[in-house]
Amino acid sequence: MTRVKRGSIARKRRTKTRFFTSSFRGAHSKLTRTIFQQKIKALVSAHRDRDRKKRDFRSLWISRINAIIAQNKNSIDCIYSKLIYNLYKSQLLLNRKIVAQIAILKGNCLFMIAKEIIKNKNSPETQLREGGRIKEICMIK
């Protein structure tokens, strides 16, 4: 019988895994058994933290909106929860990310939008739904 030399496929597999962990420190990039453990741990962390990142950004946007509203309590008779509630009720499709960007870049625009929503809260058919009035409000300053 001919001699079968083994190990080439296993070596390829281990080399491929070594490339993944090449930036890790110490034994985590040198020893085969530890490399496999660290690869699994890294992939689990990456999967878990993709969802965590979404949560973190949402809380960041909420904090930014809340901070801008808290700074100018006199100019608006509103708190964060009421602002979001009024946005939802007036069927204005602005998510927290967009509202946070408006709050940071043009704080006055956020307050104008909020006042406009409160003023037109009773009428369901308003121009705010189409967004025509928002552009007009934001272009003032």
Image: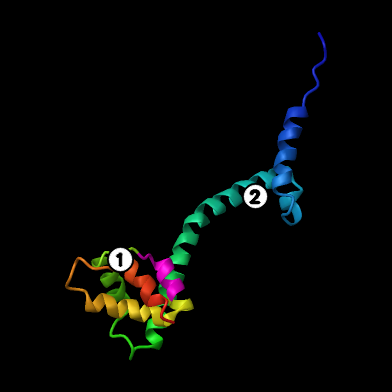
Of residues 140 and 10, which is closer to you in this image?
140
Q: Is the magenta stretch mostly helix, strand or loop?
A: helix
Q: Which residue is labeled 1 in the image?
A: 92
Numbered disc 2: secondary structure:
helix
In this rendering, the answer to whether 32 lies above or below 79 is above
- What kind of residue is marked 2? Gln
Which-is-in-front pick, marks 2 and 1? 1
Quadrant holding the C terminus: bottom left
- What kind of residue is marked 1? Leu
Scheme of image coloration: rainbow
Residue found 38% across the figure and 71% down from its top: 135
Question: Alpha-carbon neighbours of circle 1 within 10 Å: few (<14), some, or many (≥20)?
Answer: some
In this rendering, position of residue 36 left or right of residue 97: right
Residue found 28% across the figure and 77% down from its top: 116
Question: Which stretch is magenta?
Answer: 94-102
Q: Residue 61 carries which label?
A: none
Q: Which residue is labeled 2 in the image?
A: 38
Percent from the top left, x then y, of residue 98? 42, 67
In this rendering, the answer to whether 134 lies above or below 23 is below
Quadrant position of residue 136: bottom left
Percent from the top left, x then y, of residue 137? 36, 77
Asked whether residue 26 appears in the rendered view, the answer is yes
Quadrant holding the N terminus: top right
Q: In this view, which residue lies farthest toward the bottom? A: 74
Of residues 79 and 134, which is closer to you in this image?
134
Quadrant position of residue 84: bottom left
**Of pointers 2 and 1, the one earlier in the residue sequence:** 2
